[in-house]
Image (cartoon, grey):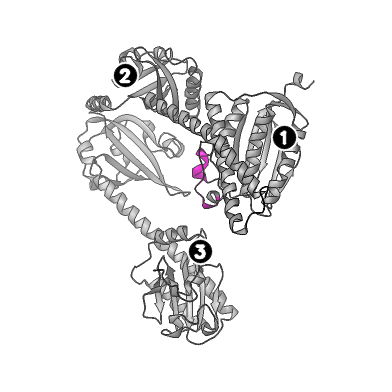
């Protein structure tokens, strides 16, 4: 049975899911009364001269009152709540006489207790525009608020949100403080917290077994008490980059700590500056790891690494180009067909067996990782002495050494089976796409004839359904075309016919071809000119890339917005830019933007549809033509997508 809605059933906000999530984040629902919120409602009732004032939070099924003046009820059903109407707007929601308002005159809260006649509610919006509820005042007599009362109610609503944020922040800080205290108390390692002058303020129980001190006994002493006198470079000196954690970063050193009884203990000393986000530095976190048991730890590591699939390793690259594997687990035999000692001093034997087609990419990726100290990640083929060609995947984190060498710590696994499955999947997608294309073309053609009334008038009752079918057939055909294009690119079967193109006229033609699509989306598309040069590219493929960028820009720009197409010469490259006024690219999605089937999670993007292949195909096309593609967000909003092609050489332009 369908549940009957009450008269004046409130509409649901368009951002309801994220609004409810934001409400839960504040952890306010069903909590005890708090004086700071009761003061707000008392002040609202006094200023507005009403018998009732509430801080109302609207969840999925009800409105619940965090604070209430002049009302006994703790909550009411959402479908009866005046506040459920108020959260749909951004300004004051005022009902002067509920008995005369068709939305509320039959509401039980009007016809019975508490006999609402007048209501004024100011939405409580968080910093992201989610209306969590309202600060509202209620009277049993019809009336209006004056300008001063309205302004005061708005200020009190802002103050209520500030209190929400402050309450949540305080709660989080207390939780963090308790967590930090618990961690420091339970950690087995020797941990010291010092102030900026190097005076120890806190110590973990782990200092006793390592240094012989009780944790409380170290409080108030200088860090030099447990650091040897001869380690002068680590004595506290605020100007010393050694002590200051390498310009704000954690520094690691092997040194000798001093036990309470005087003996020296080899330790790995970690020093990390402590600072609030965006604030001044408060002190240092010092961690002492006992290295006396290093050999035992290495043996355990080797035992554990031996149980893992693939190989756990260290790879070291010296400034003169020499390289070696200082450490490798026994898995090196399975992955590379080598014993660890064979590559311990010289890694050239490994590089000699990398597939010749993949060796340049592997060496260049290692060099890039070394220059940027970024994670190395690569998939490549390896000529195994017994297994033959296999696929490997490697990932490692680089570390700068004191001798200017780079040491990577990572692992390598055999992904031959995964690559085989990917090939089978690609072949399956290709086969299915080819098999679907012919019948789908027939279906699309038939629907086009029917909707074009080539077979006679279409009944009105069928017209909408036929148009929906035709639209979805076109979308499915676009998906299949994209899948086939990607299949050709991956298989290296897509043909490219490079030609010399007059860039300015080519871009002008592209802009002209998309004017109809721009009018459909009520967006202005403007070509603002480009350099009078020739570029070498396949015109069909270049047009495909620009069509994808322009279509995306027009789809995601708001009605009445503007999309700009332009070209320019830039550092030996010819850059073509498409500027939109859309919602931008979410930061968490940026790294995956050019991956296959990648689509942002924003609801606006889902509504726009798409296969998730267009940008991946565009990236492949540009790289096959010797160019590049990228994007960046504009500070004022919107996104700039760009493609680059090599600028013509001087002899090419003559």
Q: Name the front one of labels 3 and 1.
A: 3
Q: Is residue 84 left or right of residue 635?
A: left
Q: Secondary structure at mark 1?
A: strand
Can you identify the residue that label 3 sits on? 13
In percent of width and height, residue 281 lies at 43, 46
Marks 3,1: beta carbons within 8 A = no
Taking the magenta stretch, the answer to whether it contains residue 599 is: yes
- Label 2, label 3: how far apart the Cα atoms are: 58 Å
Q: Name the front one of labels 1 and 2.
A: 2
Query: How many neighbours does mark 2 have within 10 angstroms: few (below 14), some (14-19), or many (20 or more)?
Result: some
- Label 3, label 1: how far apart the Cα atoms are: 45 Å
Q: Secondary structure at mark 2?
A: helix
Q: Give the answer, above or below, for where 154 lies relative to 621.
A: below
Res 523 visible: no
Query: How many neighbours does mark 3 have within 10 angstroms: few (below 14), some (14-19), or many (20 or more)?
Result: some
What quarter of the picture does the C terminus occupy? top right
Sequence-wise, the earlier of marks 1 and 2 is: 2
Sequence-wise, the earlier of marks 2 and 3 is: 3
Can you identify the residue that label 2 sits on? 334
Res 528 visible: yes
Marks 2,3: beta carbons within 8 A = no
Q: Residue at x 49, y 23 (%)?
A: 367
- Label 1, label 2: how far apart the Cα atoms are: 52 Å
Name, please, the residue furthest toward the bottom.
141
Can you identify the residue that label 1 sits on? 568
């Amino acid at each position: 049975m369908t549940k009957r809605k009450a008269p004046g059933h409130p509409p649901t906000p368009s951002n309801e899911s994220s609004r409810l999530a934001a409400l839960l984040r504040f952890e306010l629902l069903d909590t005890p009364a708090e004086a700071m919120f009761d003061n707000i409602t008392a002040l609202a009732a006094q200023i507005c001269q009403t018998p009732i004032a509430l801080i109302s939070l609207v969840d999925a099924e009800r409105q619940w009152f965090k604070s209430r003046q002049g009302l006994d009820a703790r909550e009411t059903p959402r479908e009866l709540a005046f506040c459920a109407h108020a959260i749909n707007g951004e300004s004051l929601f005022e009902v002067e006489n509920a008995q005369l308002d068709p939305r509320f005159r039959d509401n039980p809260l009007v016809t019975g207790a508490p006999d609402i006649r007048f209501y004024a509610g100011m939405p409580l919006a968080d910093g992201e525009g989610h209306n969590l509820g309202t600060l509202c005042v209620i009277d049993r007599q019809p009336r209006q608020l004056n300008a001063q009362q309205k302004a005061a109610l708005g200020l009190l609503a802002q103050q209520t949100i500030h209190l929400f944020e402050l309450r949540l922040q305080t709660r989080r800080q207390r939780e963090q403080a308790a967590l930090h205290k618990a961690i420091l108390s339970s950690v087995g390692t020797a941990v010291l917290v010092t102030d900026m002058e190097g005076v120890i303020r806190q110590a973990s129980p782990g200092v006793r077994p390592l240094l012989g001190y009780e944790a409380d006994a170290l409080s108030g002493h200088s860090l030099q008490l447990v650091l040897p006198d001869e380690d002068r470079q680590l004595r506290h000196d605020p100007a010393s980059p050694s002590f200051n954690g390498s310009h704000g970063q954690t520094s690691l050193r092997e040194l000798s700590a001093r036990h309470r009884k005087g003996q020296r203990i080899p330790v790995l000393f970690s020093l990390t500056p402590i600072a609030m986000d965006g604030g001044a530095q408060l002190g240092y976190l010092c961690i002492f790891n006992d290295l006396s048991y290093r050999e035992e730890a290495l043996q355990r590591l080797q035992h554990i690494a031996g149980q893992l699939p693939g190989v756990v390793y260290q790879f070291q690259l010296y400034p003169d180009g020499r390289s070696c594997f200082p450490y490798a687990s026994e898995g090196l035999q399975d992955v590379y067909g080598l014993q660890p000692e064979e590559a311990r001093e010289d890694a050239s034997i490994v590089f000699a067996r990398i597939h010749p087609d993949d060796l340049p990419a592997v060496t260049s990726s290692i060099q890039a990782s070394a220059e940027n100290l970024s994670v190395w990640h690569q998939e490549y083929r390896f000529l195994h002495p017994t297994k033959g060609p296999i696929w490997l995947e490697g990932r490692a984190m680089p570390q700068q050494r004191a001798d200017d060498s780079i040491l990577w710590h990572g692992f390598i696994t055999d992904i031959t089976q995964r690559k085989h499955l990917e090939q089978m999947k690609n072949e399956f997608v290709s086969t299915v796409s080819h098999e679907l294309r012919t019948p789908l073309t027939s279906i699309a053609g038939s629907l086009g004839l029917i909707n074009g009334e080539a077979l006679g008038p279409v009944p009105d009752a069928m017209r909408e359904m036929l148009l929906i079918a035709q639209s979805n057939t076109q979308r499915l055909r676009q998906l299949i075309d994209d899948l086939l294009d990607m299949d050709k690119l991956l298989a290296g079967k897509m043909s490219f016919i490079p030609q010399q193109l007059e860039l300015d006229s080519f871009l002008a033609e592209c802009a002209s071809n998309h004017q109809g699509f721009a009018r459909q989306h009520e967006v202005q598309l403007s070509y603002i000119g480009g350099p009078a040069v020739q570029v070498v590219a396949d015109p069909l493929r270049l047009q495909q890339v620009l069509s994808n960028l322009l279509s995306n820009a027009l789809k995601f720009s708001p009605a009445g917005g503007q999309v700009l197409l332009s070209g320019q010469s830039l550092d030996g490259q010819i850059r073509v830019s498409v500027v939109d006024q859309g919602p931008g690219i979410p930061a968490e999605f940026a790294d995956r933007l050019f991956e296959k089937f990648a689509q942002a999670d924003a609801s606006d993007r889902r509504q726009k549809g798409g296969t998730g292949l267009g940008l991946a195909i565009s990236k492949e096309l540009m790289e096959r033509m010797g160019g590049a593609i990228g994007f960046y967000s504009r500070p004022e909003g919107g996104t700039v997508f760009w493609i680059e092609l090599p600028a013509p050489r001087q002899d090419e332009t003559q």
